Image (cartoon, grey):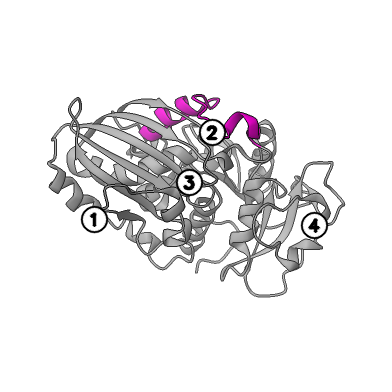
Amino acid sequence: MISHDSRIPVAVLGATGAVGQAFIRLLDGHPWFALVEVAASERSVGKPYREAARWLEGTMPADVADRTVVACSPDAVTAPIVFSALDSSAAGEVEPAFARAGRLVLSNAKNFRMATDVPLVIPEVNAEHLSLLTHQRATRGWTGGIVTNANCATTVMAVPLAPLHAAFGLTKVFAATMQAVSGAGYPGVASLDILGNVIPFINDEEPKIETELQKLLGAIAPDASRVIDASIMTSAHANRVPVEHGHTVCLSLGFERPPTVDQALDVLRGWRGDDVVRGLPTAAERALIVRDEVDRPQPRRDIHLGRGMATVVGRVRPDPIFDLRLVAMSHNVVRGAAGGSILNAELMVMTGMVPGVSRL
């Protein structure tokens, strides 16, 4: 590993895939982090990155194109911070190996999200859940650690639901998702399956939404050993739609203290998220944006707000069965995957939680 500047060295595992490429795009020119290693499967090891990856969006950063792809092993990757875009079939074995070797792993895989000692974090929503790392390291004997992102559709929901839950006590959620094809990776869904079509099934997606939301909106136990799940009953319907980027979720909500539409809008407009994210390079100036137009949010028009890190909410109105309904949307690859992991890493660096890396 060679770093040519004073930034913190980082690596990307699963660097040739769609989310791995998003990490590379977002890390290009990052003020705190220098991408020094790209790792992928055995079929890519030893090749220049430009030959190993079929680049999907924009222009491949020049300083990465000729970088040699290395194995997804702590012996081959030496950076203290590791962003994992690995598929769940590999993440379950590879990510703990890095944590045991003293590296901080920021994971997008599902494998460890619901483990009681693993933080599942959206920094604006539940930054305090990072305190689980102390317990994780003590019980597992790791000097590094694993911190996870939420599922991309759950992230869309959790950002607007966090302030509403804090203000009014969320009890019930009915969610119908319209999820972009980029969420299936590359090559993803066959064109003749998705063009002009809606696919009302995404493997494992609905259980993820129904369980992860409870953990994200839960509270840390007094001994900081686990999260006490929020008492929220969720019913999810997950659908794949012919949209490139941007997951949209239609939500109907029940509350302990049902708000009026104006009360809910006041809370949503006034929410800024946890103060700890202020000034972090990847954080949006406003993590939650309310649109008043009757036909917003729309992925084509709104996914780039906040450089892809904002969640956009609209159509807040009464619900005839529950109490309130609304539509939420955000960029599934940026906010819901790579950008979310980078923001987690920035927060941990700023607060001195990365082994071997000085607090900023």
Lower sequence index among marks 2 and 4: 4
Q: Nearer the viewer, residue 144 or 211?
A: 211
The residue where tag 3 is placed is 246
Question: Which residue does the numbered mark 2 point to in the structure image?
Answer: 196
Of the residues tagged 1 and 2, which is closer to the observer? Answer: 2
Instruction: Name the secondary structure under disc 2.
Output: loop
Type of residue at label 3? Gly
Q: Earlier in the sequence, mark 3 or mark 1?
A: 3
The single residue placed furthest to the bottom in the displayed view is 5
Residue 351 spot, x, y in % from top left: 45, 61
Mark 3, other Cα within 10 Å: few <14 / some 14–19 / many ≥20? many
Q: Quadrant of residue 325?
A: top left
Which residue is denoted by mark 4 in the rendering?
50
Alpha-carbon span between mark 3 and mark 4: 27 Å
Give the residue displayed 34% in from the left and 36% down from the top: 250
Instruction: Say whether disc 4 or disc 1 marks the residue closer to the N-terminus.
Output: 4
* 96 left or right of 41 in image: left
Image position of 204 with respect to 222: above or below:
above
SS assignment at label 4: helix
Q: Which residues are magenta?
A: 188-214
**Residue named by callout 1:** 269
Q: Amino acid at mark 4?
A: Arg
Examine the structure image and report whether residue 13 is included in the region drawn in magenta.
Answer: no
Element at label 3: loop
Residue at mark 1 to residue at mark 2: CA–CA distance: 35 Å
Q: Are marks 1 and 2 in contact (CB under 8 Å)?
A: no
Question: Which mark is in front, 3 or 1?
Answer: 3
Q: Are marks 2 and 4 in contact (CB under 8 Å)?
A: no
Q: Depth-wise, is mark 3 or mark 4 nearer the camera?
A: 3
